[in-house]
Amino acid sequence: MHPIDHHRRRLLVAGGAALLAACQPATPTFNGIDMSGTDHGRDFKLQDPDGRTRTLADFQGQAVLLFFGFTQCPDVCPTALARAAQAKALLGTQGGRLQVIFVTVDPERDTPPVLKAYTGAFDASFLGLYGSLDETAELARNFKAYYKKVPTGSSYTMDHTALSYVYDPAGKLRLILKHDQSAEQVAQDLRRLLA
């Protein structure tokens, strides 16, 4: 092959590859951990404070931010829910398309009225859900979330995962938000999912 023809062929191949790359949709980059395509937490079936059974299908068309915690948590849970409220506010009009769900890992103490008052203190739209001890354990396993009852003198506290799980409006688990992410970073991730 003539040297000029070989050079032309390399240019054509490189140009074709560049055009193909330009035609591919851009993969969104997230501040959180991208969980797209994983098999974690495909659904849940829990009770809300009014006694209704809730599943993921109830929130179709919304982004769902789900957090495991307990109402007597001294720091991690209130911080996570306050950050979720800030992120919702940062979303502006899109904030109405976000459902925050707080799943208690302490259903023995977190009764429906306690859950309702607790989540409502952060935002009236936030929803506290609960199940039996067995249902809670099974759900945590599905999410690969950790929690454990820890005795403290005459009472106990709960050690638990400090991550938030985010579903896109189609009901697919897409993200895990780390506890150290800021409200602004959370809002950026939610905007990408709601776009």
Image (cartoon, grey):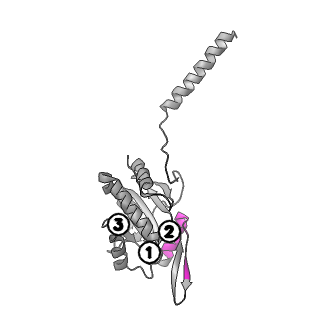
Mark 1 or mark 2: which comes first in sequence? 1
Q: Which residue is mark 1?
A: 131
Q: Which mark is residue 126?
A: 3
Rendered residue at 60%/22% (across/down): 13
Figure check: 156 above or below 83: below
Q: Quadrant of the N terminus?
A: top right
How far apart marks 1 and 2 lie (CA) works out to 9 Å
The tag on residue 139 is 2
Q: Residue at left 42%, top 47%?
A: 192
Mark 1 and mark 2 in contact? Answer it, CB < 8 Å: yes
Secondary structure of the residue carrying tag 3 is loop
The residue positioned 44% from the left and 67% from the top of the image is 79
138 within the magenta span: yes
| Residue extent of the magenta highlight | 134-150
Instruction: Kindly identify the amino acid type of the residue bearing the numbered disc 2.
Output: Leu
> Label 1 is placed on what type of residue?
Gly
For label 2, the crowd category at 10 Å Cα-Cα, with few meaning under 14, some 14 to 19 and many 20 or more, is: many
Q: Is 145 included in the stretch rendered in magenta?
A: yes
Q: Earlier in the sequence, mark 3 or mark 2?
A: 3
Mark toward the viewer: 3 or 2: 3
> Does residue 5 sit above or below 45 in this rendering?
above
CB of mark 1 within 8 Å of CB of mark 3?
A: no
Assess disc 3: are there few (<14), some (14-19) or many (≥20) residues with their C-alpha within 10 Å of its C-alpha. many
Query: Is mark 3 in CB contact (under 8 Å) with mark 2?
Result: no
